[in-house]
């Protein structure tokens, strides 16, 4: 009932004043599966409807949010659309090429990539400048994309493990190919350094390769799991050299990148519901600026933060350090809304972006409860 | 009008006036005060050092604003210490005119449950009980002084989300309701009270409390999308859109206040001058400036006083992490009141 929902929202509003340092709630016309920082203050989102025209937008988040003083705790402080364009078809993946105004997208069912110019001060248009061909066509899941950290605009992409290549964007030249026999669907692709790449397979195995070397990539088997036919998602942390793998039944395993053969460092059974076959929306990621913490989204309408330093070597249940329930609370159908993406702020330890299937986009910075309770956090002003 | 000229002041006890030259309807001239200032000619300002209490570390409510408001009024020489009236703590009897016995028992004894406390935004403590009771006492005193002098302001007040049997949104007792009830019932025939609530949040508690009461008219101008989303029905609600700025906001108030005064003919106006319509307020979704708030407060008080109706103002809501900025913003109503006081030759 309308009144009940209003009451729930009112309760949550009062609660949110306590548990968030900052919280900004936005509504896009169409939901996004993409949240990509293009600077410390700008983020790209894009639609993924099956229609032929989906918007790609670069949003400028309000100065207040990212200033040290005068932080906001109010819904819909304006964000500005600074650049926008249209894509033919859905945009399921988007990567910004660091140091440039270039981005690369994939529609989630073909292997080719679209290349975009995000626009500069003189233009507010995001326009397509070209494309990058992938390997074989007809891939169900579409290509994963990783941007090389160095200043050379190169992009690593592929949908299957035997199909991964590094392409120079301007020339279209293939600079490197992953030499692997087996063909496994990929759930992630990333650079941990400028030359070390990690490919995570849906079945749980990991490939680690040095793109300067012609040697075959190191292969690491899937984690031991009691469940069959699970899907796995992966994230590698450049700063801590750790790898996290999360299965569709909630088992999370942490390994050392440099010692993948040495078994798991720790693991835990997360407090999430098992997902069915639709795995497009699950994301697991290491915090860039908060030691040992990961964020998990896509299993429900919540984003969960876990502290892996509390995990043991044997599989035990664990509870989140924090849960962002904003998308569920403000939805008309709390059980129907799913988070579609999340992204940590590159520098601010507890600031995240999250997006959900109802078109909501939230930016939030949560209060470190344990510090608050012990009184060791910032003094009240 | 009063003819009381000289009176000694005494602390602690409720002060009874020995003689009164006023009309029978105002025969009881007790003030709920710890300190009265009959010898001061300036704008009466009600303040108590116990408007504050300690909160748990990292608690977000800007408790520090209350003493800072008073500090800035003195520092900027808007008022002198001599103008400060000190309220008594609101008695249980006074509170029970609005709040249920069950709620008051739980509230005073600390037996409200966790769910109830969560909705208020405050964990229970003896300190919070005391400060809320003093705040309510302050609004009651401001109303009493206004009836005698024409105009008075508190440095707190406006806890309009409190209902008879529960607290909500940082409000544990409804000070405006208690003051209105007191003023209404302490004379015969009953006085009429107009509550003008310009806080950005709807005065839902007050609206609910006086829904069936013809002697109290509740008027609220608020942002539709701000808390509470579940709205009550005031006698007159004006719900405005996000982002409203000075000029349009003032027009909105101007469109309603004069005819309300004309048709309802109150004996007292209680004015909630919340500063959360300000663009820099962290919770409010409107875009008023300092100047806009000042013009608003000046307009309200001038219009009411100009018709010979007494007005008591409270600071209402405001939410910011910069306490000094916030306190200065809250002090706008006192500055406007001081100007009205001067210009009206009060």
Image (spheres, rainbow, N blue to C red):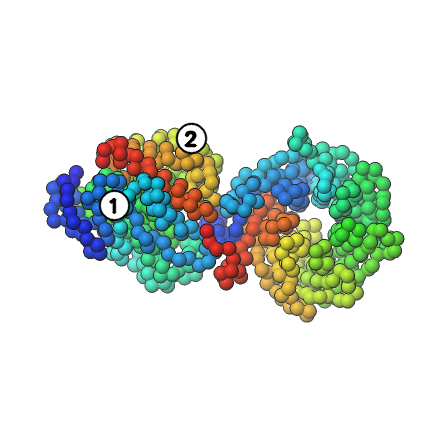
Mark 2 sits on what residue? B248
Which residue is rendered at x = 47% and y = 40% of the image? B280
Taking depth in this image into account, of B131 and A356 the one nearest to the observer is B131
Which residue is rendered at x = 26% and y = 51% of the image? B87
Mark identifier at residue A159: none
Residue B309 spot, x, y in % from top left:
24, 36
Taking depth in this image into account, of B204 and A49 the one nearest to the observer is B204
Q: Are discs 1 and 2 located on one and the same chain?
A: yes
Can residue B69 be seen in the rendering of this structure? yes
Residue A247 spot, x, y in % from top left:
70, 59
Which residue is rendered at x = 78% and y = 53% of the image? A197
* Label 1 to label 2: alpha-carbon separation: 38 Å
Q: Mark 1 lies on which chain?
A: B
Mark identifier at residue B82: 1
Tell which tag, 1 or 2, sits nearer the viewer: 1
Query: Hey, which residue is sitting farthest bottom in the picture?
Result: A314
Q: Mark 2 lies on which chain?
A: B
Mark 1: give few (<14), some (14-19) or many (20+) Cα within 10 Å.
some
Residue A66 spot, x, y in % from top left:
57, 45
Residue A221 spot, x, y in % from top left:
79, 62
């Amino acid at each position: 009932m309308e009144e009940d929902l209003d009451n729930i929202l009112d309760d949550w509003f009062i609660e949110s004043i306590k548990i968030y340092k900052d919280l900004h709630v936005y509504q896009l016309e169409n939901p996004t599966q993409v949240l990509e920082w293009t600077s410390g203050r700008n983020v790209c989102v894009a639609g993924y409807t099956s229609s032929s025209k989906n918007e790609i937008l670069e949003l400028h988040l309000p100065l207040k949010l990212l200033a040290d003083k005068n932080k906001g705790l109010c819904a819909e402080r304006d964000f500005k659309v600074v650049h926008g364009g249209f894509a033919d078809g859905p945009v399921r993946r988007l990567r910004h090429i660091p140091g440039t105004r270039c981005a690369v997208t994939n529609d989630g069912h073909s292997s080719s990539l679209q290349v975009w110019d995000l626009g500069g001060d003189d233009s507010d248009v995001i326009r397509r400048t070209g494309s990058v061909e992938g390997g074989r066509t007809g891939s169900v899941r579409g290509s994963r994309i990783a941007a090389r950290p160095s200043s050379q605009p190169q992009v690593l992409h592929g949908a299957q493990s035997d199909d991964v290549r590094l392409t120079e964007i301007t020339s279209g030249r293939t600079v490197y190919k992953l030499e692997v026999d087996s063909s496994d669907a990929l759930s992630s692709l990333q650079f941990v350094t400028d030359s070390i790449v990690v490919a995570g397979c849906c079945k749980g195995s990991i490939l680690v390769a040095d793109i300067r070397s012609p040697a075959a990539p190191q292969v690491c088997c899937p984690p031991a799991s009691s469940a069959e036919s699970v899907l796995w998602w992966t994230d590698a942390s450049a700063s801590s050299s750790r790898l996290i793998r999360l299965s569709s039944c909630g088992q999370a395993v942490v390994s050392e990148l440099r010692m993948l053969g040495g078994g798991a460092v720790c693991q835990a059974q997360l407090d999430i519901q098992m997902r069915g076959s639709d795995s497009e929306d699950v994301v697991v990621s290491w915090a860039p600026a908060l030691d040992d913490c990961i964020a998990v989204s896509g299993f429900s309408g919540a984003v969960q933060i876990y502290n892996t330093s509390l995990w043991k070597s044997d599989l035990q249940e664990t509870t989140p350090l924090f849960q962002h329930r904003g998308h569920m609370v403000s939805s008309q159908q709390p059980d129907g809304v799913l988070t579609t993406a999340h992204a940590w702020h590159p520098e601010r330890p507890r600031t995240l972006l999250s997006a959900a299937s109802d078109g909501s986009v939230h930016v939030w910075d949560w209060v470190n409860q344990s510090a608050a309770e012990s009184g060791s956090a910032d003094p009240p002003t | 009008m009063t003819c009381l000229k000289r009176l000694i002041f005494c602390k602690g006890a409720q002060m009874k006036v020995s003689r009164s030259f006023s009309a029978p309807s105002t025969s009881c001239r007790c003030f709920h005060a710890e300190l009265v200032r009959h010898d001061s000619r300036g704008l009466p300002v009600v303040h108590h050092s116990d408007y504050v209490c300690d909160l748990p570390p990292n608690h977000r409510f800007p408790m520090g604003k209350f003493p800072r408001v008073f500090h800035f009024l003195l520092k900027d020489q808007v008022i002198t210490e001599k103008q400060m009236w000190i309220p008594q703590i609101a008695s249980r009897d006074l509170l029970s005119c609005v709040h249920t016995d069950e709620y008051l028992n739980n509230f005073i004894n600390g037996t409200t449950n966790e769910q109830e406390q969560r909705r208020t935004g405050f964990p229970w403590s003896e300190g919070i009980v005391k400060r809320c009771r003093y705040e309510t006492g302050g609004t009651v005193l401001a109303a009493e002084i206004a009836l005698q002098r024409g105009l008075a302001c508190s440095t707190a007040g406006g806890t309009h989300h409190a209902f008879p049997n529960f607290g909500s949104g940082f409000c544990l007792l409804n000070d405006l309701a208690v003051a209105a009830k007191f003023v209404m019932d302490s004379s015969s025939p009953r006085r009429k009270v107009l509550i003008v609530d310009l806080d950005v949040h709807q005065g839902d508690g007050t609206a609910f409390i006086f829904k069936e009461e013809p002697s109290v008219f509740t008027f609220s101008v608020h942002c539709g999308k701000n808390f509470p989303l579940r709205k009550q029905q005031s006698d007159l609600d004006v719900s405005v859109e996000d982002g409203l700025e000075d000029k349009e906001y003032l027009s909105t108030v101007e469109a309603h206040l004069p005819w309300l005064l004309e048709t309802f003919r109150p004996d007292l106006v209680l004015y909630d001058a919340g500063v959360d319509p300000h663009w820099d307020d962290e919770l409010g979704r409107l875009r008023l400036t300092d100047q806009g708030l000042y013009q608003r407060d000046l307009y309200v008080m001038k219009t009411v006083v100009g018709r010979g109706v007494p007005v008591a103002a409270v600071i209402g809501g405001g939410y910011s992490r910069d306490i000094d900025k916030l306190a200065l913003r809250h002090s706008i109503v006192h500055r406007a009141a001081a100007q009205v006081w001067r210009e009206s030759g009060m």
